[in-house]
Image (tube, rainbow, N blue to C red):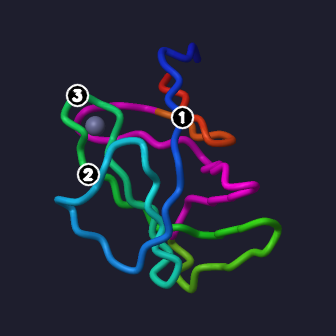
Amino acid sequence: MRTLKKVPVTVEFVSDINIDDLKPNIMYIRKDKMYLTHLCFCEDKCFVNLPISTLTIDGVSKQSDDKGCSWDVEIKNEKITVKPSILNHPCECHYIITNGIANIV
Ligand SMILES: [Zn+2]
């Protein structure tokens, strides 16, 4: 896969999400609910809300109770890595977030 664009992203921990307040290139994490929320990197900036399976912050891990979840989020020195990649519908924007950079492929 070829990277089309690299976009630096930052992390914000929040307790609640107001869709109208979301800013691009910020990964919002609700620790209590284990959700990763952000705006997609497509033109429409679609709303993306992903359940987190394992959240690791500077080596300390928390598991979700929901076994159906599939994204692992690691934050190290304030840089976020999300596995596996994220593919959104219907825009088909596909990206991999590694070490604070969203690689759009
Ligand atoms: Zn999109």
Give the magenta part as a residue range: 69-94
From this view, report whether residue 24 is shown above or below residue 92.
below
Q: Is 54 displayed left or right of 18 in the figure?
A: right
Q: Give the residue at x 69% y 58%.
A: 74
Q: Where 87 falls versus 48 (above or below)?
A: above
* Left or right of 69, for residue 93: left
Q: Name the residue under label 3.
A: 43
Q: What residue type is labelled 1?
A: Pro
Residue appearing at x 58%, y 40% in the figure: 97
Residue at label 2? 47
- Frontmost residue, 76 versus 71: 76
Q: Tell me which image quadrant ligand 1 sits in.
A: top left
Q: What's the CA distance linking mark 1 and mark 3? A: 17 Å
Label 1 belongs to which residue?
Answer: 8
| In the depicted structure, whether residue 100 falls above or below residue 37 | above
The percent position of residue 98, horizontal first and vertical second, equals 65, 40
